[in-house]
Structures are given as C-alpha cells and as structure tokens.
Amino acid sequence: MKLAIDGGTPVRSAPWPSWPPPLSAGQRELVTGVLESGLWGATQGSLCNDLAAAFAARSAVPYGVTVGNATLGLFAALRGLGVGPGDEVIVPAYTFVASATSVILAGATPVIVDVDPVDLHLSPAAVEAAVTPRTAAIMPVHLAGSPADMDGLTAVAVRHGLAVVEDCAQSHGALYRDRPVGGLGDAGVFSFQASKAMTAGEGGVIVCRDEGVHARTWSTCNLGRRLGGEWYGHPEVGWNLRMTEIQAALLLPWLDRLEEEIARRNAFCEAVERGLGRLSVPWGPAASAGSGAGGAAVSSSAEPDRSRPPVTVVPQPPGTTLDSRHLLMLRVDAPVDREFLLAAMAAEGVPLDGGYPPLGTMSALVEAGARVEPCPAAEAASRTVVWVRQSMLMEEAAGASDVVEALAKVLGADR
C-alpha cells in the first residue's frame, strides 16, 4: 500500500477534535458575568478563591492558591516550603523544562535524575542515589496523566527529611491508590495552560495541607503581604503571581465535566491498546532496510526484539487507580527511523509528537548550574517513545483504529 508521504491515500482525512472544546453554557454565563461586572482581578472578585478551594477539596487538602501559570506555581510552592539558595531539588529527566526552571527561579539547584525504564516516571532508586546533604525536596511529575510511584518516592523523602512537591500539570483528576494527586505530598501544582486537560489559556493552582506552607505560598504570590494583613504591608519579599477572575470563570464550570472527559480519553486509549495487541508488521529483512523518496522507513542499526509487539503503550506505574490520560505514550520497538515515522504518520492524518528530550541534554540548564546524573532510561525514551496528543484522545473510541492502521501501514511499508 502506497504511503501518503509518497503520494498515496492517507488513512485519515477527517479532522481530530479541536482543543479546547467549545464553551459550555456554564462557562459562557460565568465569563459573561465577570466581564460585565468589571471585577476582573483576583483581588476584586471571589472566583479565584472559589477555584482554589475547589481544587484543594478535590485534592483532599484544606488550602489552595491560584497563580498565573504552573511554572510560577512550582516556584511559589518551593518558596512556601522554604526551599531556596544552597538547596537542591531532585527532578526527573523525562519531563517538561519548567520542572527544572522553577527550581532555578527559586534560587535552588535542580538535580536531574533518571526515570523508571518501563513507566518513565521518576525512579525512587535514582532519587535515593542522588540525595546529598543539600537536598531539600523531590519533585515527582505525574507524567502524561498517570501518578508517579508516590509510595516509593515518599519513603525516600521520609528517610531523608525531604519535602515533596507534586508536579500535577498533566494529571487533573488522576488517582493513586484511590487518593487524588496533588494531596499526596507537601504541595501539588496543577496547570491550566492551553494544552492541558482544563485550560484558560494559562493559569495554575497550588494545593497544600499545612497552614504555614499555605501562608508563605500565598504571600509569595501576593507581593509579600500577609494573609489578613494590611494592604500596603509587605513583611516578606513576594511577587504578583495571581490569576484573573476571567480565567477562574472559564475553569470552575469545567470541573463538572472533568470525569466525563477522562472517561472518554481512557476509552480511546484502551481501544488503541487493544488494536496494538493485534498489530502485525514484518520483522524480517523487508522491515530492516530500505529507502525511498521520503527517507528510510526503518533503521538497520539495531536488531529488533521480535518477542515483543512492534508498538506498545507505556504502562502506568504501580498504584495507578485512575489515569487522567493527558497523553498516550507509545513505545516503538520496531527499528524505524524516528523522523521518518513522525513525518509519515502526519501524512497519514495521524500526527504524533516526538516527546521530550532528556533535561540533562539542555545546555541552558547545565549552564545555569543544574546537576545531571546518568539518565539512560530517559535517553532511551527520547529515541523510542512518541505521543498521541490529548485532543486526539477526545475522539470517539472508534477513531482509535486510525492510529493503529496508520502505524501498521507505516511500519509495514516495504521501502
């Protein structure tokens, strides 16, 4: 079958769902009300406080603070926990750069360590090996919507007296051993950036269980003011990191449909996984060499493991009760040229994302003082793992067949 990249007919011509979805009636009514009121700032209305309280309750903790974005949220949470210059914060190598830059913003040193080679979440063993007398905190990332191994990571934290800041940017609604993420550590930070499962274009929220941590975090986000203190009293150094009421108006009604959207994404992901279990592509000589106008279909640099399926879903870490499925991560074991795979899949109407480079390969972080531990699992993931984006996961489950068919077509091409 002729590949679309070579002029053939693509597997899919229909568009994927757009993101964000259309405004709900509740969003439209609340946003209109805020706009017409003129009370747009967080210090003028009540919606930012309502959103913070709602997320705290959903995280099973008493306190929440809304912020302009989750990078600022991670920074403020670290400040609230007393992390600053001279301290180290351990972060995973396979994550978005903000996990590390928020640490730098707080004046501390990010220590980049490896992830579990199977599920790609922060490895407790790698964290244990990286702890020094300067280590102050661990930052697990609930990657792609599934919870990190919080039992293992918390055990390391307790053993060494470390704070735990959960990066929940991709995990709205996820559950670990029936407990909501965000409330499992000392603080949790959610993102409302444009690609996230709940979005107001930008925005974030910090949740925590300790009153003192909440007071310091709130002060950091509110120009050093003290909760209940004078408006022009600034006993601490702080910044204006606040969200707007307009953003909160977009987000509050979203909570009513979050579970339904998570279920929809899980249905699509489960359909993809079932289809991949039946996927059959040639593993013989026709699939180990060859070239064409669009480039090499596969690489002959490594012998494939024919005992494994050519493409598998990256599994959830142990303890996952509910994966919120921000992304579907696929591990491609077929010896395919990565850049060709991405280009050919896009031509078939099924665009995939190449995923993260390891944080330790980013020269800007190293130049800013980050300490980088050996990260072979993250390096392997950067070569073999691709993503199906959240907007595609919002398609009806029947659309999963297009993902599987396109993979079979591209990987099975005799080029």
Image (spheres, helix red, strand yellow):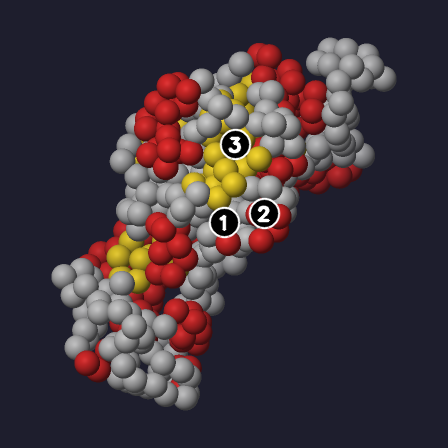
User: Mark 1 highlights which residue?
Assistant: 360
Q: Position of residue 59 (x, y in %)?
A: 46, 25
Q: Residue at x 33, y 43 (%)?
A: 116
Within 10 Å of disc 3 (Cα), the crowding (few <14, some 14-19, many 20+) is many
Q: Residue at x 49, y 49 (%)?
A: 360
Assign a secondary structure to mark 3: strand
Task: Choose the circle earlier in sequence order: 2 or 1.
Answer: 1
User: Mark 3 highlights which residue?
Assistant: 89
Assign a secondary structure to mark 2: helix
Q: Position of residue 41 (x, y in %)?
A: 76, 32
Assign a secondary structure to mark 1: helix
Q: Which mark is residue 365?
A: 2
Residue in front for this viewpoint, 270 or 329: 329
Where is 86 relative to 199, above or below?
above
Within 10 Å of disc 1 (Cα), the crowding (few <14, some 14-19, many 20+) is many
Residue in front for this viewpoint, 403 or 103: 103
Where is 293 relative to 216, above or below?
below
Where is 281 relative to 181, above or below?
below
Task: Choose the circle earlier in sequence order: 3 or 2.
Answer: 3
Disc 3 to disc 2, C-alpha distance = 13 Å
Task: Choose the circle earlier in sequence order: 1 or 3.
Answer: 3
Disc 1 to disc 3, C-alpha distance = 14 Å
Asked whether the residues under the numbered discs 2 and 1 touch, taking CB atoms below 8 Å apart as contact, a structural biologist would say yes
Q: Position of residue 259 (x, y in %)?
A: 41, 38
Residue in front for this viewpoint, 323 or 188: 188
Within 10 Å of disc 2 (Cα), the crowding (few <14, some 14-19, many 20+) is many
